[in-house]
Image (spheres, rainbow, N blue to C red):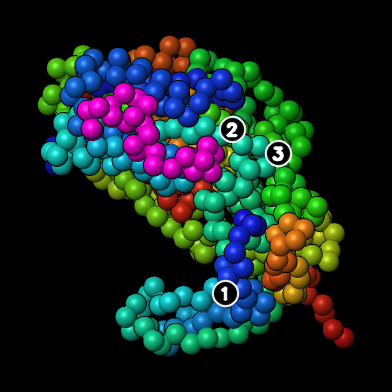
Amino acid sequence: MRDVAIIGVGVTKFGELWDKSFRNLISEAGAKAIIDSGISGKEIDALYVGSMSAGRFVGQEHVGALVADCSGFSHMHIPSIRVESACASGGLAVRQGYFSVASGMNDVVVVGGVEKMTDVIGSEATDTLATGLDQEWEAFFGATLPGIYAMIATKHMHDYGTTREQLAQVAVKNHANGALNPYAQFKRPISIESVLNAPFAAYPLGMLDCSPVSDGAATVILCAAEKAKDYTSKPVKIIGSGQASDTLALHGRKDICTFESTVHAANMAYKHAKIEPKNIDVAEVHDCFTIAEILAIEDLGFVKKGDGGKAIESKITTLDGEKPVNTSGGLKAKGHPVGATGVAQIAEIVMQLRGDADQRQVKDANIGLAHNVGASGASSVVHILEAI
Amino acid sequence: MADGAVPRFWREIPQRYNLIGNQCGACDRIYFPPRESCPYCRRKSMGNMKEIKLGSKGKVVTYTIIYVAPEPFEGQAPYPIAIIELDEGPRVTAQIVDCELEDVKIGMRVQSTFRKIQEDGYIGAIHYGYKFKPLEVKG
């Protein structure tokens, strides 16, 4: 296996983008990444696209071919592959693209992620997100995705004394970061009180504990590391990649408060990169709900199991803390177009490691981690990147 | 989740109406819903999985109260959903009924009850299954 570098990134604005279609979004992110990378376009060996549910959100399957077509590559007949792992589709698309370059089969690949979620009404979006749950044994009985995460929160509060205020502080921190990100859906800081006073989605999670329904796309260009300097002066190397699975239903797991898929994916990535959690300078983690960020920093090994709430309270994970988490605003404030999220996380880490993150730049960031979760933790993907 | 052909719901009736699970003949582990084979014993369990009717009692492992409900459940919101550990070991996700919202607690004893779960619009099939209610203490 050979080394792989990221030579370009492109993201669209995230939000309720009523004037942009699925095709507009992925083409825009792709074009931005190609321009950023310095490739002409002729070098591209393959396309990978993460999309959770184009079929339900925009009534369109055959997404691989569609993206090749709308991005202007159909006449070149470039192979194009759609990747799906619920909300981890984007992260998994990066991992598939990584394999194809690391194996030597391809030299340059484009990995995009996209979701257009606001062409359906809110309840249809909620139902579609719930397809990442166990349809027969969770959703059939009236469980929703926020409801499943809410059950994790209830248990975490019961077992470890985590408070609703600590959960709220995740949202407050991520909205503060989002306010510094020009691509974020929400660019307004919020207070703990507004999070606590918001109507419940699923007790104990209020509406401001939840990431929004969003449109958006992100793209990264992967290249064999030995050729990366031909295109860019600031390549970023993928030094670790991990992926793991778990039971589809939350009730199938021994420990409700641990995503074993994250633990295993992270261990795989740390071992691959030959580093430990303490070596991570900046991280983008999957905060689809506030409780999810608390779980993530525990399962990734940043803090001990059960200490996540206290860690948020002691501000370890703020922009100027010792372990900045979700500098982009995270899914919570940047937005969560599900298929795009995993790729956008990688794009944010690349910007941080290149020193291109402007107002939200973490000082001396050399090693970064991206963590992408499928629905309620039945799949996780972790990548570790390093500035070359 | 609603709209669709009936077989999808019909084939799960034994499990959803009567909590029918199965047990591995090699290691005695109990599964709900039933599995084709035991993930731990694999080929030793093939053809050796025995149907078993689970009891109705269990306890709440964790819970939530759903305020923003999927369309078929909108009329029921807010309603509690819990993970229940049956006394035989398997865990299920189900609604808690016949009590106040604030009465639902981690560790509370519950028993299954046969109820309507959702319906497929006004003219479609009505789907039944298990919900759980506080355990009635007799005597």
Dot 2 or dot 3: first in sequence order is: 2
Q: CA distance from mark 2 to mark 3?
A: 24 Å
Q: Please tell me which residue is depicted at 39% across the width and 73% down the height of the picture.
A: B39
Residue A311 lies in the magenta stretch: no
Q: Are marks 2 and 3 in contact (CB under 8 Å)?
A: no
- Residue A357 % position (x, y): 41, 15
The residue where tag 2 is placed is A119
In front here: A166 or A22?
Answer: A22
Is disc 1 in the same subunit as disc 3? no
Where residue A343 appears, x then y in whole percent?
Answer: 39, 32
Give amino acid for label 2.
Asp
Task: Report in which chain the residue with disc 2 lies.
Answer: A
* Mark drawn on residue A206: 3
Marks 2,1: beta carbons within 8 A: no
Q: Which residue corresponds to mark 1?
A: B11
Residues B68 and A51: in front is: A51
Up the image or down, A27 lies above or below A169; here it is above
Q: Secondary structure at mark 1?
A: loop
Most distant residue in the right direction: B139
Q: Give the distance between the C-alpha atoms of the residues marked 2 and 1, in whole angstroms.
A: 34 Å
Q: Is residue B97 visible?
A: yes
Subunit bearing disc 3: A
As helix, strand or loop, the secondary structure at mark 3 comes to: strand
Q: Is residue A72 within the magenta segment? A: yes
Residue type, mark 3 in image: Gly
| Quarter of the rendering containing residue B42 | bottom left
A104 is higher (above) or lower (below) than A158: above
Q: Residue at x 52, y 51 (%)?
A: A132
Q: What are the residue bounds of the magenta stretch?
A: A53-78
Q: Position of residue A255 (x, y in %)?
A: 52, 59
